[in-house]
Image: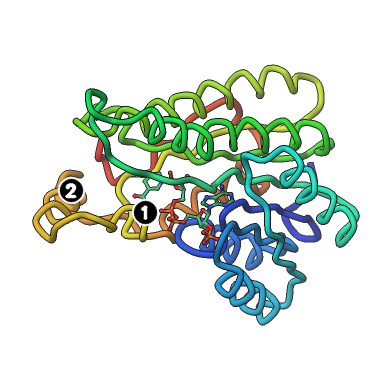
């Protein structure tokens, strides 16, 4: 099993939020990084600059993770730039709360497209390109355990991610590659904060016994553990990183 240093990692959706922090954590542990983004090229370029300050190589690559051609091009660009892919973090995701009765199919389709189809697409490419010692980590969500009103499509999409990760780990038998999910509790990013009142945020922040929101760094540390030598024997698992939220 190779150490983290000298490896290349693709982090989908790493222009901001949790993905950005995962990219920085992996870079600090010696990985060269492909910063994938969808809309915010300016932010992705800023993350690339930060990684270079850490002494690692990085490129920003635009791709919609749910688009077959785009995701293929993301993996091709990584190989062209670095010649290898060792770690793939399927982090890109969107969230919208909509009640099942009353939600349009358009909302359901949009959430499933990015979160479930996107993860499927990225996992499939990771399975094709990773070799011995490879690591695949996908972002689920701890909200799966709390089926709150409005979270139907989002929880459905993340349930798909957890299933895909466990099946993938078994499909990779014999290749020395681990495949796991990390399921954060509420983390104070745009995805979580948008559209919530101060009271809603305070109530969710105090839901966990540790009585605070998670930080992107809390989640990135768990991902870096799974991507590094210490995580070698963890496979086909969902690691809930949530302060005890559920
Ligand atoms: P943010 O909204 O802060 O960031 C989302 C990232 O995903 C951005 O980099 C965005 O790119 C990218 N992205 C969105 N759609 C696509 C797409 N189709 N293709 C490629 N990239 C895309 O979200 P978080 O950092 O909060 O969430 C990261 C992951 O963690 C998600 O999977 C989310 O479901 C999960 N999660 C988050 C929790 C939270 O409380 N924040 C809790 C549990 C799970 P761009 O900037 O270019 O638009």
Residue that appears at 75% across and 63% down:
32
Q: Position of residue 152 (x, y in %)?
A: 31, 28
Neighbour class for label 2 at 10 Å: few (<14), some, many (≥20)?
A: some
Q: From the viewer's perspective, is the residue at label 1 or at label 2 nearer?
A: 1
Check disc 2 and report the residue beneath it.
204
Q: Is residue 41 left or right of residue 200?
A: right
Neighbour class for label 1 at 10 Å: few (<14), some, many (≥20)?
A: some
Whichever of labels 1 and 2 marks the residue nearer the N terminus, that label is: 1
- Near-viewer residue (106 or 74): 106
Q: Position of residue 80 (x, y in %)?
A: 90, 57
Identify the element where label 1 is drawn. helix
Q: Position of residue 28 (x, y in %)?
A: 63, 68
For the C terminus, which image quadrant? Answer: top left
Extreme residue in the left direction: 199
* Mark 1 CB lies closer than 8 A to ligand 1: yes
Residue that appears at 29% across and 27% down:
145
């Amino acid at each position: 099993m190779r150490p983290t240093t000298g490896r290349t990692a693709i982090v989908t959706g790493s222009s901001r939020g949790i993905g950005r922090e995962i990219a920085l954590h992996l870079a600090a542990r010696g990985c060269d990084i492909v910063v994938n983004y969808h809309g915010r090229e300016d932010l992705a370029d800023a993350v690339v600059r930060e990684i270079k300050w850490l002494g690692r190589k990085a490129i920003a690559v635009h791709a919609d993770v749910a688009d077959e051609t785009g995701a293929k091009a993301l993996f091709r660009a990584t190989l062209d730039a670095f010649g290898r892919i060792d770690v793939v973090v399927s982090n890109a995701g969107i969230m919208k709360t909509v009640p099942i009765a009353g939600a349009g199919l358009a909302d359901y389709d949009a959430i499933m497209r990015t979160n479930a189809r996107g993860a499927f697409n990225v996992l499939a490419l990771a399975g094709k390109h990773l070799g011995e010692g490879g690591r695949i980590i996908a972002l689920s969500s701890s909200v799966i355990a709390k089926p709150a009103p409005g979270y139907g499509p989002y929880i459905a999409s993340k349930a798909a991610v957890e299933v895909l990760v466990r099946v993938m780990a078994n499909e990779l038998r014999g290749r020395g590659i681990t495949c796991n999910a990390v399921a954060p509790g509420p983390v104070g990013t745009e995805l979580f904060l948008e559209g919530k009142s101060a009271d809603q945020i305070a109530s969710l922040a105090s839901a966990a016994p540790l009585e605070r929101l998670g930080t992107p760094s809390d989640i990135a540390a768990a991902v870096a553990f799974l991507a590094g030598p210490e995580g070698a024997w963890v496979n086909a698992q969902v690691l809930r990183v949530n302060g005890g939220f559920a």
